[in-house]
Image (cartoon, helix red, strand yellow):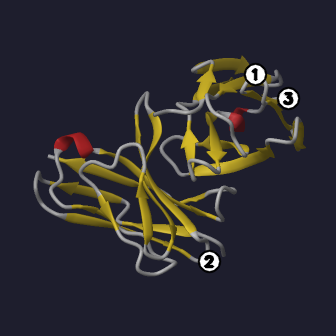
Amino acid sequence: SQQGEEDPQALSIQEGENATMNCSYKTSINNLQWYRQNSGRGLVHLILIRSNEREKHSGRLRVTLDTSKKSSSLLITASRAADTASYFCATYSWGYQKVTFGTGTKLQVIP
Amino acid sequence: EAQVTQNPRYLITVTGKKLTVTCSQNMNHEYMSWYRQDPGLGLRQIYYSMNVEVTDKGDVPEGYKVSRKEKRNFPLILESPSPNQTSLYFCASSDRGETQYFGPGTRLLVL
């Protein structure tokens, strides 16, 4: 069963705007990971945030994690056309010994 | 270069004809997984392996087999493929619970 659920399913913005995607999950986790996938290609890791962390940055990416609400958000600032892709959150739990992906958010950045 | 390779990249086959998709990683990772990706369903885990000779079912294991005889290789076997196994397949490897490195994907069409 899916652990992570992304919201929105699709997002269309103008170049230069910020894009925010949300992920909710159901069980306790050890870490949460965000990945990007360009159309039909392999997933590329963006950021990993651990359960004892609340916020993490990498370049134009900012990830927050709220374990009390079982949710995470990915913010892409000053978006570019090259950011057009699908974004997935994935959760890892020691108890389940596996990584579970959500259904993804499809982001379109219009030049 | 750290990488995960999959072969073949594209495959068209007929119902019932056994096939194997190979996966190999050069990062000495203990953890390897197979996923399938279908429109609207995100990535669903088929099988995973935590080390040599240690494998376990993911969320959608029916109709698939795996083996882990060597640390670097994790082949996916479809003993009797059916049309509902038409999908995009990804292999991934990682240190347990950490960032996953994905292969380029295998597009399978079962007629």
**Residue A110 seen in the figure:** no
Question: Which disc number belongs to residue B42?
Answer: none
Q: Is residue B68 above or below residue A23?
A: below
Name the kind of residue labelled 3 in the image: Ala
Residue receiving disc 3: A78
Secondary structure of residue under mark 2: loop
Q: Is residue B44 left or right of residue A17?
A: left
Q: Is residue B26 above or below residue A40?
A: below
Residue at horizontal 59%, vertical 20%? A10
Residues at marks 2 and 3, CA–CA distance in whole angstroms: 37 Å
Name the kind of residue labelled 2 in the image: Asn
Residue receiving disc 2: B28
Name the kind of residue labelled 1 in the image: Lys
Residue receiving disc 1: A69
Pinpoint residue B93: horizontal percent, then vertical percent: 57, 63
**Residue B21 seen in the figure:** yes
**In the picture, residue B21 is in which quadrant?**
bottom left
Q: Nearer the viewer, mark 2 or mark 3?
A: 2
Residues at marks 1 and 2, CA–CA distance in whole angstroms: 36 Å
Chain at numbered mark 1: A
Indicate the quadrant containing the N terminus of chain B: top left, top right, bottom left or bottom right. Answer: bottom right
